Amino acid sequence: MKKKEFAELKSKEISDLLKMVKAKKTELAKLGPKVISGQEKNLKKAANIRKEVAQILTLVREKEIFKKEEKSENI
């Protein structure tokens, strides 16, 4: 994922990010058999998808923590 794409993700809502994670995970599940059968030439594609999922989930967690801190400051 490029820096520009990651910066765009920061502006999205948590629900949108979770939908993206779900889509990436289904893409990863479909990619497994293709790699094993030799249809997919890019062997690093699965690793890149896992990395993107991790980055998105980290961003989701950051947003959750930020919201929690905002609530505690307002009380």
Image (cartoon, helix red, strand yellow):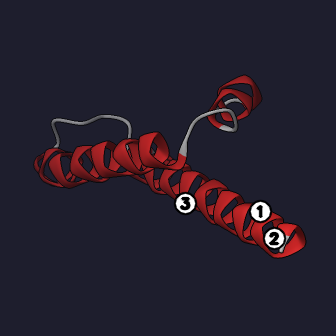
Which numbered tag is attached to residue 57? 3
| Quarter of the rendering containing residue 24 | top left
Q: Nearer the viewer, residue 50 or 75?
A: 75
On screen, 11 above or below 28? above
Q: Is residue 61 left or right of residue 33?
A: right
Which numbered tag is attached to residue 66? 1
Specify the amino acid type for callout 1: Phe
Q: Is residue 31 left or right of residue 47?
A: left
On screen, 72 above or below 17? below
Q: Is residue 67 left or right of residue 24?
A: right
Distance CA(mark 1)–CA(mark 3): 14 Å
For the C terminus, the quadrant is bottom right
Q: Report the residue marked by disc 2.
A: 69
Q: Position of residue 6 (x, y in %)?
A: 68, 35
Which numbered tag is attached to residue 20? none
Q: Are marks 2 and 1 in contact (CB under 8 Å)?
A: yes
Q: Secondary structure at mark 1?
A: helix
Q: Position of residue 72 (x, y in %)?
A: 81, 76
Task: Please name the residue shown 10% across and 48% down the image.
Answer: 37
Task: Bin the neighbour count of mark 2 within 10 Å (Cα to Cα): few under 14, some 14-19, many 20 and up.
Answer: few
